[in-house]
Amino acid sequence: MTDLDDLISVLDFERRAEQLLPPGVHGYYAGGAGDEVTLAENRAAFRRWQFRPRMLVDVSGCTTRTTVLGEEVALPVLVAPFAVPGLGHPDGVRGIARAAAGAGTLHCVSSLADASPAQVAAAAPGGRFWFQVYWYRRDTGITRAAFQLAAEAGFKAIVLTVDAPRVSRRERDLRNRWAPPADMIVPSLFEATGGKLGRQADFFALLSDAMTWRDLDDIVSWSPLPVIVKGVLTAEDARLAVEHGVGAIVVSNHGGRQLDEVAASIDALPEVVEAVDGQVEVLLDGGVRRGSDVVKALALGARAVLIGRPALWGLACGGEAGVERVLQTLQTEVEICLALLGVTAPSEVGQQHLQRAQG
Ligand SMILES: Cc1cc2nc3c(=O)[nH]c(=O)nc-3n(C[C@H](O)[C@H](O)[C@H](O)COP(=O)(O)O)c2cc1C
């Protein structure tokens, strides 16, 4: 049994999770693509920024509250989508969803999660959710049905992941001879096809690597919910995303799991923010492990961040309670960081609070 009180930082959760998880599942969660250069860079790049704090500011009313796409959240930290979170703990995505709801934030539920949008909504009443999708280009009817079911379940947005026309080679999985079981059921697909299709193998057989920006136009035009794109890393694509009508952009390299040797998310953020020029909100994920990382992302123009693996480590260590503890820990760290920086809210953080690290 893990006593959550022993786990003080996200890094403590990470170490403990490695002891608890079966090696194959741990490798799948922790690993990245290729030489894992981007995986490491996502962390290292945060260290290349230092704070420029201001003193003698009244920070007695300091809050971590903010809004993301008009939704009020208790902290500028959302929970990213994960395939098969149930492999790490029986609470699975329902536990993550309840923890996010308990912490007052949003969870972006993966279409490969171990519960459908309706099941997640039923498990976490009062929660706020986005639905992450890959596009079933080989059968648009299924995509439309999946969006409709998410809207009916009260989900607030569709998050289209655009950095995965193919699944990358993740060598830890190959070395461990590990893959998510192909006959595992994907509840969101099962429901969207009225029970006709539902295995992981069916899911991947429906995907196509031929998707283009023109297809995004179609999706935006018939989606009942705002469409967010996840996986943008350049100013060029950020401008295209805005032109094609997205509601927000997530700067992300999929946690270093897709194209290796791309920029760390925090390094790609400034050019995306500049290109978007305030037209839509910009979020970031990748390597966020500390409240200070969150605040650095805000300073460089992100509206909020999403955490990936930290939520999975929380789940492995304590199910729903573990995820909630991870979110509380980050909230405490964000609040301390804001106050010591001399600001009282996420919206007050700006570029003036950062400089490139010396030496
Ligand atoms: C085990 C695992 C499964 C993931 N599954 C998905 C997924 O189904 N869809 C998706 O868009 N991103 C997926 N991601 C990427 C995350 O949403 C997120 O972009 C990434 O984990 C952020 O980096 P971090 O883990 O360093 O915080 C997955 C990440 C991990 C670690």
Image: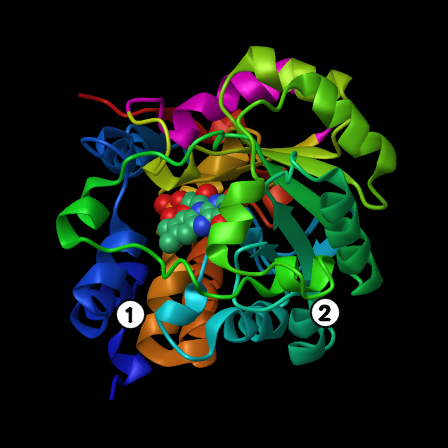
Name above or below for residue 328 compared with residue 300: below
Q: Is residue 171 left or right of residue 191?
A: left
Q: Find numbered disc 2 in the image and state the secondary structure of the residue it sits on.
A: helix
Quadrant hosting residue 242: top right
- Whether disc 1's CB lies below 8 Å from ligand 1 is answered no
Q: Is residue 120 left or right of residue 217?
A: left
Colour mapping used in the image: rainbow
Q: Which residue occupies the foreground of this view, 350 or 28?
A: 28
Residue 279 in sight: no
Give the residue at x 67% y 61%: 196
> How many neighbours does mark 1 have within 10 angstroms: few (below 14), some (14-19), or many (20 or more)?
few
Magenta-tinted stretch: 261-280
Q: Is residue 219 located in the magenta-colored stretch of the structure?
A: no
The residue beneath circle 2 is: 118
Q: Residue furthest left?
A: 175
Q: Earlier in the sequence, mark 1 or mark 2?
A: 1
> How many neighbours does mark 2 have within 10 angstroms: few (below 14), some (14-19), or many (20 or more)?
some
Q: Which residue occupies the foreground of this view, 117 or 334?
A: 117
Quadrant hosting residue 154: bottom right
Q: How far across and down, in percent of the image, does residue 359 sit?
A: 17, 21
The residue beneath circle 1 is: 8
Q: How far across and down, in percent of the image, does residue 178 sit?
A: 24, 55
Q: CA distance from mark 1 to mark 2?
A: 34 Å
Which kind of residue does numbered mark 1 sit on? Ile
Q: Residue furthest front?
A: 196
Q: Is residue 279 located in the magenta-colored stretch of the structure?
A: yes
